[in-house]
Image: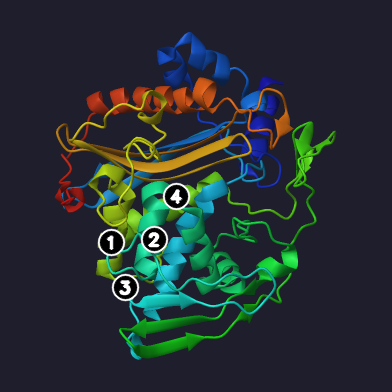
Amino acid sequence: MKNLIAALLFVSCTLPGLAQEKTDPWLDSMIRSQASPFLLNVLNQPDTFQYQFIYTQIDRDKNNKPHFRNYYLHVDKNRYFNPASMVKLPTALLALEKINTLSKYGVTKYSTMLTDSAYDRQTRVVWDSTAEDGMPSVAQYVRKIFLISDNDAYNRLYEFTGQQTLNERLWKMGYKQARITRRFVTMTEDQNRHTNPIRFKRNNELLYIQPPAYNKKNFDFSKKILVGNAHYNREDSLINAPMDFTTHNNFPLEYLQQIMQSALFPEATPASKRFKLTEDDYSFLHQYMSEKPSESAYPFYDTTEYFDSYTKFFFFKADRGKIPPYIRSFNKTGWSYGFLTDVCYIVDFKNKVEFMLSGTIYTNKDGILNDDRYEYEQTGYPWFRDMGTIIYNYELQRHRNFVPDLKAFQLQYK
């Protein structure tokens, strides 16, 4: 009987469709053995906090080639969490990929990008006060996405790339459950399917005109997604029913981890999962994925509001502490509706340590969405701090056959 039960458990954990959640007992045990009472309380309530966590070990061979191994806690592609600003990561990468297709017209990521309007609720952009030359560009939008997770920057790259291109490219890369359906501004489903005409210029020379686009493809909204017990609607009226996320953006944590890994280590990524970017694109991305707001001149940020750990959830944001000069987090975060998410690559140049962490947690004690009463400070950020610290301490003593050469990630910051 014991053998039969063991066999059934093995089958249920390995066959797709029977068991979707991934948990590695070793990781669960290791974290619990080091956890504080606070962290244990969260870990013991996976249904309440809906946390998912991926720890990616990186080992280099004698040629410094990285090899990756993932360990999981409650990771499930079918468990919905609102990705919020995490969708800016693939959008930025696909915008850079698309801009490279326009090189024959003389267009680059630094070209002036003028956004026009051609449909209901669309808005124009003809200047950018945060840019050194005062003009908008794909490069400047990407900078703002990674430095402070700027919403308007995402909207403009969503419009440039186009809803249909965004989704079809992700699906072709194997991210079948990914869905990017909306800007971060109030619009209907139809309005989000329409994207703006755009002009690219160099000084006064018109280089290229992109016509308005419309996505005719259908999304699979057959799975109903309801979150919470109640919510406030757009008119600030309390609705005593869960909030409906059926047509919202969707991006499983595993996908985000894979996309971040591909952006950081393209040479170690299968061709089907690799973005069509140049070496300069990757250098550019790595710069702004890791740069602190205090190191940015254009855009310039008030660091009392945009402090250095503003978008660094793992380790740092809970205490707003200074990030040690020998550690860099190359990452993207998202936060909305009580959900917090961070996907990062951590490098400790002093101790020759590198690893990746990906996590999401839901902190909404009253079960009401859109009331701006979430436990980010009390629960969310401390969870990221404690989970990251345990893995970091483990990494400090973990044996490696070859010491990694990390100079490729030692960048110069202004």
Q: Is residue 357 at all visible to an observer of this figure?
A: yes
Crowding at dot 2, Cα within 10 Å, few <14 / some 14-19 / many 20+, comes out as many
Q: Mark 3 — residue?
A: 110
Q: Mark 2 — residue?
A: 142
Specify the label residue 267 is tagged with. none
The amino acid beneath tag 3 is Tyr
From the image, which quarter does the N terminus lie in?
Answer: top right
Specify the label residue 149 is tagged with. 4
Q: Secondary structure at mark 2?
A: helix
Q: Quadrant of residue 10?
A: top right
Q: Position of residue 87 (x, y in %)?
A: 53, 54
Question: Which residue corresponds to the image point at 67% horizontal and 56% vertical from the top-left?
Answer: 186
Q: Quadrant of residue 6?
A: top right
Q: CA distance from mark 2 to mark 3?
A: 11 Å
Q: Position of residue 342 (x, y in %)?
A: 46, 40
Q: Classify residue 141 as left or right of residue 226.
A: left
Q: CA distance from mark 3 to mark 1?
A: 11 Å
Specify the label residue 284 is tagged with. 1
Tell me which label, 2 or 4, sits earlier in the chain.
2
Tell me which label, 2 or 1, sits earlier in the chain.
2
The amino acid beneath tag 2 is Val
- 246 vs 210, nearest the viewer: 210
Question: Which residue corresponds to the image point at 51% horizontal and 49% vertical from the top-left?
Answer: 86
**Can you say whether 289 is above or below 303 in the image?**
below
Q: Secondary structure at mark 4?
A: loop
